[in-house]
Amino acid sequence: MLVHMHSMAGLALFFLAAMVVVQAQGTGDTFESSKAPADWAPTADPDAPQWKGIAGISIGNDFYGKPVNLGPTVIRSRWTDGNLYLLYVCPYRELYLKPGPVTTEETNKLWDWDVAEAFIGSDFQHITRYKEFQVSPQGEFVDLDIDRENPKPRGGVDWQSGFTVKARIDKEKKIWYGEMKIPFASLSEASVKVGSEFRLGLFRIEGGEPNRTYVAWRPTGAKSFHVPTAFGRLVLR
């Protein structure tokens, strides 16, 4: 449920905080997410007040750490007590989209088309368990409960996180934007605070075969994103 600010004072506080230059940065295996003063509905707009001053990280390599022939994908993150936000800025060559998109319910096998993905786990003792979230340029979405050792029926697609998305395509700039709002309650039973950590994989798929391009924040060393030993860390700041 969205937290709305009903007073002018609340709005002023939000925009004042948004003007402060805080950065979500990736160093090595760590991606830092900056706390926001209030929740919002995803807009897929990198110029929105809540994203001002958030530098994010840039990814542009494949499974094996080799550069891809595609402009760098920038990913930003913020968080509140209730939700984690991820914003993807995705330059593209040619869009590869599913015909007849449905945005009112999840689309299974969305990964067959252009998508941005996040794999997030809270269990550092059982790293083969994590959640998968995807958004397409058309605003389609899917979430999955992954357990590599004991796979869930239908690959975990029946699980519902309650996350919401927004996407937008800028055809002139040849960039698409995708934003996710992920409830922390879907990731862990524990409450979050500054310093809380999660396991994280960040990915993107662009194009159709034979020119399909796979982009990874951290090299997996295999032709798959599902290599949890290669995940990095998301740290709440």
Image: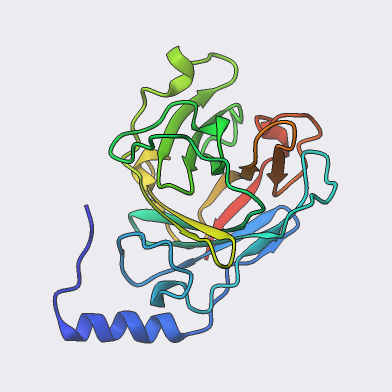
Q: Does 24 sit left or right of 136 as displayed?
A: right
Residue at screen point 58% across, 73% down? 23
Q: Does 185 sit left or right of 55 as displayed?
A: left
| Tally of marks | 0
Q: Image quadrant of residue 231?
A: top right
Question: In this rendering, does residue 88 appear at all?
Answer: no
Q: Is residue 70 above or below residue 129?
A: below
Residue at screen point 57% across, 61% down? 175
Nearest the viewer among 186 and 88 is 88
Residue, far left:
6
Nearest the viewer among 30 and 102 is 102
Question: In this rendering, does residue 36 appear at all?
Answer: yes
Residue at screen point 37% across, 39% down? 186
Q: Image quadrant of residue 44?
A: bottom left
Residue 212: percent from the left, percent from the top?
Answer: 70, 37
Q: Is residue 38 above or below residue 95?
A: below
Colour scheme employed for the rendering of this structure: rainbow
Residue 222: percent from the left, percent from the top?
Answer: 79, 29
Residue 101: percent from the left, percent from the top?
Answer: 38, 37
Residue 156: percent from the left, percent from the top?
Answer: 44, 22
